[in-house]
Amino acid sequence: QSALTQPRSVSGSPGQSVTISCTGTSSDVGYYNYVSWYQQHPGKAPKLMIYDVSKRPSGVPDRFSGSKSGNTASLTISGLQAEDEADYYCCSYAGTYTFDVVFGGGTKLTVL
Amino acid sequence: EVQLVESGGGLVKPGGSLRLSCAASGFTFSNVWMSWVRQAPGKGLEWVGRIKSKTDGGTTDYAAPVKGTFTVSRDDSKNTLYLQMNSLKTEDTAVYYCTTFRAASFDYWGQGTLVTVSS
């Protein structure tokens, strides 16, 4: 399975909204509603922010939201804050006959 | 509080072997599917392998690059997950994270352990 496609970087000012896209194929993002998003600060472990396309784990601010249209999933962060500056990775289930999972290449979010 | 603590990383020569451990606490380990995810220096995340709970069969699955050389196992009596890595290559150099796998996502992560494969 090929990696999902994410923009290398996005940026926004405090208070603004940004959207990170994640493009896959009809065999992963387009087929399964099992898209998740992870936030990773430098030198830290990733943290789950969104699962099942649009669900938030307990403790994740509602400024973070997820959606999907066709083969592309999106993570939107509204009301940007300085602490949102991090790398973000999307992930999709991709198994047909066997279990498989594929990640995106990651997007660096800069808060200006 | 869920805690996952990896250990066993280090420097190993190409062709060598290494076994990573992950000590779990704060949840009923035996009921949870577990996984390993790695991250090469300066690169993105890559799923490595997953093991189901014993009640769901305890079976394993692996990413193509490690199939046949890496083995995921678990000891529910010790609340510990393992990753046995054989025939290591320089491209296996990475931070290896232990994760829980629930709702088709990696919901809790350890702090990671660095494996360096170099001569």
Image (tube, coloured by chain):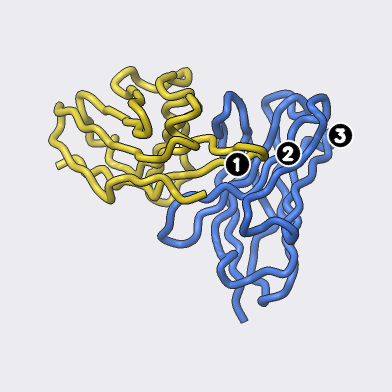
Could you tell me which residue is drawn at 68 percent across and 41 percent down?
B50
Could you tell me which residue is drawn at 62 percent across and 59 percent down?
B65
The residues bearing labels 3 and 1 have C-alpha atoms spaced at a distance of: 28 Å
Up-down relation of residue A52 to residue A48 (above or below): above
CB atoms at circles 2 and 3 under 8 Å apart?
Answer: no
Could you tell me which residue is drawn at 51 percent across and 54 percent down?
B39
Percent of width and height locating residue B11: 64, 70
Residue that lies at the very extreme toward the bottom in this rendered image: B119
Q: Tell me which amino acid carries mark 3.
A: Ser
CB atoms at circles 3 and 1 under 8 Å apart?
Answer: no
Which mark, by number, is residue B104?
A: none
Q: Secondary structure at mark 1?
A: loop
Give the letter of the chain under mark 1. A
| Residue under numbered circle 1 | A100
Among numbered discs 2 and 3, the one appearing first in the sequence: 2
Up-down relation of residue B116 to residue A10 (above or below): below
